[in-house]
Amino acid sequence: MDTQTIVILDFGSQYTQLIARRIREQNVFSVVLPCTAPISEIQALKPLGLILSGGPSSVYDADAPAADPKLLELGVPVLGICYGLHFIVHHLGGKVLGAPRREYGHAEVVIEDAESALFQGLPPTLAVWMSHGDEAAKLPDGFHRTAVTASALAGFESAERRIWAVQFHPEVHHTPLGPQIIKNFVFSICGARGDWTPAHFIETTVAAIREKVGAGHVICGLSGGVDSSVAAVLVHRAIGDQLTCIFVNNGVLRKNEFINVQNNLRDRLGLKIVAVDASERFLARLAGVTDPETKRKHIGAEFIAVFDDEATRITKETGGVEWLVQGTLYPDVIESSSVKGPSQTIKSHHNVGGLPLGMKLKLIEPLRDLFKDEVRRIGRDLQMPEEILGRQPFPGPGLAVRILGEVTPERVALLQEADEIVVAEIKAAGLYSSIWQSFAVLLPVMSVGVMGDQRTYAYTAAVRAVHSEDGMTADWTPLPYEVLKRISSRIVNEVRGINRVVYDITSKPPGTIEWE
């Protein structure tokens, strides 16, 4: 059975990925493409429908995103959101102007066309989230207004042309009934089946891997985290003993991680694992490096170099290795690459932005289209233990992006001790599973302290704990005072070299979850 797809064209909105998530929550697959994607690329996906995202530009700007207006003529249903609405109006003969009264934040929308398929099952008045400074002053011929606010048009459509549009953002939590609008578009208008389930994903992915690999041998870069573990089990289900997992000690793992991961994944998952202690190689590459992007690039390149070395060795045993499995997720791709079109790259990820052009191995990334919670759903259907699936995300570059400034063996050891205390205390408080990520950061800031009536001059540790759905946005977690007190007390008393602890109360945006 073919996978049905809703294509989202990104015009630079900070909410674009939320649209993708809201669709997937309905068991329908969605994919984000830059708005500049050629028509042929869109058509190749055989989309059930198109959604045009919001964006910060004005359609009449000279540097407005250069999307092809022919995308409105593909014959599939189209939903424009915010800027997407303006794009439709502008390119179909209507008129978009700067609004005399901009609308940002909460607003109330009155539905004028109760028969609209987009608004079926909704009350006549909706609480919504607006974020725009332009308005549709004149609609294209053949369209009619379907919703309004007190000051402007909020929706229009032409069912005959299979085009619908709203000025507000149905994908955000601030529009409580927004999921119903998206559901109406996906099912009532586009006719989706809603059969994109974990079982369907596993079945189609396993078949695709078998076809791609054939009789070849595959190695998997295993970190011990959720992503690479699920990727390894998925590939193992497809090709069995043709898979060898390589677990690399990159010198910036958590305390005792190198031994614990080997024991856990060999015993619990039955995977064939080759453990490589390359800590000296990685730390040598990081010596003197302070720029965050350079750290990530160096770590990514060194990972591939290690894999190439191991592949050469394994080739002698298996007759050849052609493929490398990575646990790349959709947020990695989104934040690292040009998939967001007009949106900016936030940071590169070691398994996306750090790959050298001359890499010898071909990639298999079975989770590349998934968000973290979707990966956990796949893992549960694969009957993987919750002890592995419930682990909080850990960055591919490890503690290197939690040590600001140069990464040295001494700083790594300090952070390993502090981080273990943070995680232990959060687990002891019963909070670990309800927090997206919780960890310590080592700052290159030294301050004066006093311990045992003696002056100290030592590093500062920051504690970070956040709530998130998928890592794209996050809110800081208000940890209980007693938990913070125990964490602080233990770090300054047990970790010689840290004499001050601070708590990071920055959300994403404006900050990122990791500090680098």
Image (tube, rainbow, N blue to C red):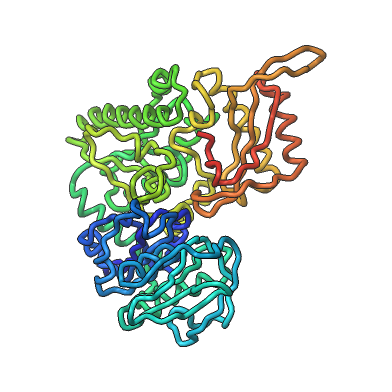
Identified at 27% across, 56% down, the residue is 37
Q: Judge from the rendering whether residue 78 lies leftward or rightward of residue 387; answer left or right.
A: left
Going by the picture, which residue comes out furthest to the right? 453
Pinpoint residue 85: horizontal percent, then vertical percent: 40, 68
Task: Identify which residue, 30 or 35, lies in the foreground.
Answer: 35
Picture coordinates of residue 289, whole percent (x, y): 44, 21
Total label count?
0
Whether residue 363 sits left or right of residue 401 in the image: it is left
Looking at the rendering, which quadrant does residue 47 occupy?
Answer: bottom left
Q: Residue at x 28, y 40 (%)?
A: 324
Relative placement, left or right, of 203 versus 360 is right
Task: Report the front residue among 414 and 214.
Answer: 414
Picture coordinates of residue 119, whole percent (x, y): 48, 80
Name the quarter where the N terminus is drawn: bottom left
Position above or below: 45 against 469: below
Q: Residue at x 53, y 65 (%)?
A: 100
Q: Nearer the viewer, residue 263 or 404?
A: 404
Compared with 483, 410 (above or below) is above
Which residue corresponds to the image point at 35% horizontal and 60% vertical from the top-left?
9
Residue 306, by quadrant, is top left
Looking at this rendering, what residue extends furthest in the bottom direction? 115
Look at the image and tell me whether residue 318 can be seen.
Answer: yes
Q: Taking the image as drawn, is residue 379 in sight?
A: no
| Image x and y of residue 486, in percent | 74, 35
**Residue found at the far front of this picture:** 100
